[in-house]
Amino acid sequence: MVCAHGGDTTRNPPNTGAAFSAALAAGADCVEVDAAMSRDGVLVVLHVRELAQLLGKTGMQVGDLPSSDLLSLRWASGESVIGVEEAVRLTSPFVSCVTLDVKTYNGKGGEELDGPRIAEALVALVGRTGCTNCLIWAKSDAVVRRILELSPGQRTGYIVMNETEEARSLGMHHPLRFGRAPVPQLSSHHLQRQNYHAPGEPEPPTAPQDLPRQPARAPQPGASQPGVVGVHHAMVEPELADIVHGAGKQLFAWTVNQAEVLKAVLDVGVDALVTNYPQVALEAIDARITKCGSHYGGAKELARRGGRRSGPGAPGPDGDYL
């Protein structure tokens, strides 16, 4: 499955109606929608880096501004910031999956200040829109746990990454950390390359003390487990895929914007990939299938699509995909 990261941003600003419409036209069967909460409690589709671009300055978070100000922001192309509900209603009927990527408001010490509120708002939105194909994932395990407590049947996921000291100090590099006490045993090769630490060994250096460690507790009784693990593409290797799939979970790779990364994650056999350039990715997968046959790594499942043209991938705006 190819998931459009903020829509198709080849020629459109991310997280806009135009970008999501372009992703649908390209044949993407999944869209990822950044979901943040305004100061007055409205869910808007906006990432903090996009807010900085729109405001022309850094240091502001989505939750610092009321929805009236946020929804009035315009890109140079004329596209405006939209609400999460609008994005869900625009895309949900036409894709297999709408991934709502939770963006929390963080305090100066890194603590999440709106986690419970945004979890409750998203569960209510999914119910209100009847979005049975919505997946909610987050970097915050606390948010995912809260969503499952509120709606045990909700499809959820959590993020696995290891490229920063902060992520490792929070345990975000453990692929099966959610609701499980033991850390999976991995080969020394994998430990070395992916910065895992084996049980009993010292952990990597911790982040500053003002960055709180997320409590390692299981969801409350009655809550289900997340079924999707969103892994940073640099960590996607066959051994990790075996661990994730062995636990009955799906493996999504993010963010896949280069040709060599696309090849690598397809070779491993991911269940989905997240990319800014879905049309380019789909065409590259078509070319791969034509050249290598109808079953190569994860390509067959990823490329099962109708009504789109086949052909070699074209370069993205930044030279991505060859």
Image: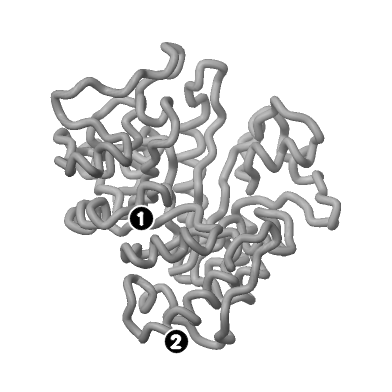
Residue name at image x 54 percent, y 39 percent? 103
Do the residues bearing badges 1 and 2 touch, measured as CB atoms within 8 Å? Answer: no
Quadrant including the C terminus:
bottom right
Nearest to the eye among marks 1 and 2: give it: 2
Disc 1, SS: loop
Q: Position of residue 235 (x, y in %)?
A: 36, 47
First along the sequence among labels 1 and 2 = 1
Residue type at the position of mark 2: Thr
Write down the residue under mark 2: 290
Point out the residue furthest to the top here: 209
Write down the residue under mark 1: 155
Q: Position of residue 89 (x, y in %)?
A: 59, 64
Q: Give the total number of marks visible in the rendering.
A: 2
- Mark 1 → mark 2, Cα distance in angstroms: 34 Å
* Nearer to us in this view, 320 or 83: 320
Drawn side of residue 236 relative to residue 136, left or right: left
Q: How is the image coloured?
A: one colour
Residue name at image x 55 percent, y 62 percent? 4
